[in-house]
Amino acid sequence: MRLRRTLLLAPLALTLHAQQTPSPATPSPAVTRYIKVPAAEWTVLRHVRVIDGTGAPAIDNTDLILHNGKIDSIGPSPKIEALPSAILLDLTGRTVFPGLVGMHDHMYYIARPNLDAKGNSEPPLIVPELPFSSPHLYLGAGVTTLRTTGSVEPYTDLNLRQQIDTGRIPGPHLDVTGPYLEGTGSPFMQMHQLRDADDARSTVAFWAAQGVTSFKAYMYITRAELKAAIDEAHKHGLKITGHLCSVTYPEAAELGIDDLEHGFFVNTQLDPGKSPDTCPSTVGNPTLATMTAGSPEAKSLIDLLIAHHVAVTSTLPVFESYDPSHVHLQPRVLDTMSAPSRTAYLYTRNLELTRAAANPEATAKRAQMFKNGMALEREFVAAGGLLLAGPDPTGDGGVLPGFGDQREVELLVEAGFTPLEALRIATLNGAIYLGKAATIGSIAPGKNADLVVVNGDPTQHITDIENTEIIFKDGVGYDSKKLLDSTLGRYGQY
């Protein structure tokens, strides 16, 4: 006899009896150790609150039925009684929403050799890759798809994607970005510095052939190099985003860029003394202070971006330190950092607080700039722009993989979006940009069962998105706590 399998989450208990349907890739022992709900023909999430990711109101106390890794249906159904082999999960008090689609995520962190309490360090600036802790943190925190948004070790990221897809290690689905398309003057020695437009073109062509699926332009690229890169990426059917400085937002939009990183925080178009193809030392701060939400300059820029179908990626966590008093230290973040990375972060954090106390007027101006950046993102969305979400987790500002993605959603709510709107930005909008809205990004019949189960109700308390319990990826439920615990004290080490 084939018996129904039942998983009660209060308290947690799992009884398995029926034959399982194979996963898309047979998981290795390195993956199965983190699986709480194995692949099955039928899995039923009972008495759960469903946030579907479209911005629609949540559905309380309903059932969500999964079939062979896909979403079958939402709502009470007599079909359940006809599924004697199904895994049943009692999710009373829990909420399920689509897996987060991280649109500015990395697999590395930034290290400053021999950093001391006064902020002094030695060259060179180093960017170590973290191919163990990063994917574990992302998946454990509910990120089921992400764009690496700039690689310092693109072959590592490509191989990481392959190992995840073949079930050898756990992690999200990866959209692998090629190496940074950077011009002359970068402080990062691991980045190739483009010689000219031909070099930009050939670099994009080479990495497209290696299998990367997107590109990112960086701060010192010239307009000619950026135009060549854009045209070559589009020739291969790929998109290109940019964290820009030498090229302004209006210039990039006219050149055909697909996405701009860091909201409106790094646009340099109104910086005094800005010269063509040069990154000013002010790196966009005067523009952010001057181009206030609702101003003619802001409206003109937003209209231009929308007319050229340019998306904007919000990365509020990495700018939260504009107001040092605003940043909250989370024990889970400090506990996850390795001892050296934790010490370096606290040195930087203490310096920011000291400087803020010494110059309250400048601190107040920077805090207002942070609020203005939030307001510009709201204005962009209100005008019809496609806003994406990601935290830029490089360790700077205490922003870590996964935890930073959750913090981004919380800050979107603080910026004035409703919890339902913020979750749509962090899920469906990313899927739309990636061209994957037919399969991920929202909860609907036929879509992949990429889901996050949390204890609580994010529509009432957005911080409940941190209470992750099970992360479904392709219908397989991963134990969030086990994934996160595996990284304790390791971020910054491997």
Image: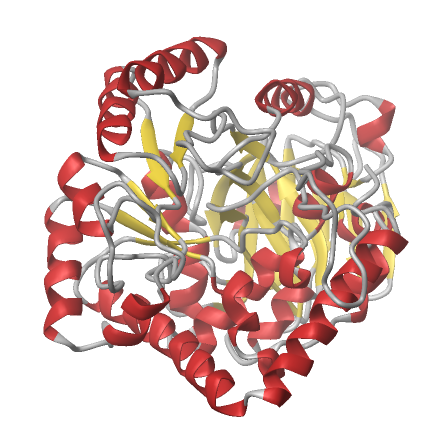
Q: How is the image coloured?
A: secondary structure
Q: Position of residue 46 (x, y in %)?
A: 64, 58
Residue displayed at 58% across by 65% down: 407
Q: Nearer the viewer, residue 202 or 338?
A: 202
| Residue 408 seen from this side | no
Q: Position of residue 380 (x, y in %)?
A: 24, 64
Residue displayed at 22% across by 63% down: 270
Check the picture and name the quadrant holding the C terminus: top right
Q: Quadrant of residue 370?
A: bottom left
Asked if 67 appears above or below 161 in the picture, the reply is below
**Residue 399 appears left or right of 131:** left
Asked if 251 appears above or below 322 in the picture, the reply is above
**Residue 432 appears left or right of 73:** left
**Residue 350 appears left or right of 418:** right
Residue displayed at 71% across by 51% down: 470
Q: Position of residue 34 (x, y in %)?
A: 82, 39
Asked if 262 appears above or below 319 in the picture, the reply is above
| Residue 488 seen from this side | yes
Q: Quadrant of residue 457?
A: bottom right
**Residue 443 appears left or right of 272:** right
Q: Quadrant of residue 84?
A: top right
Residue displayed at 54% across by 71% down: 320
Q: Nearer the viewer, residue 34 or 241?
A: 241
Q: Position of residue 246 (x, y in %)?
A: 31, 45
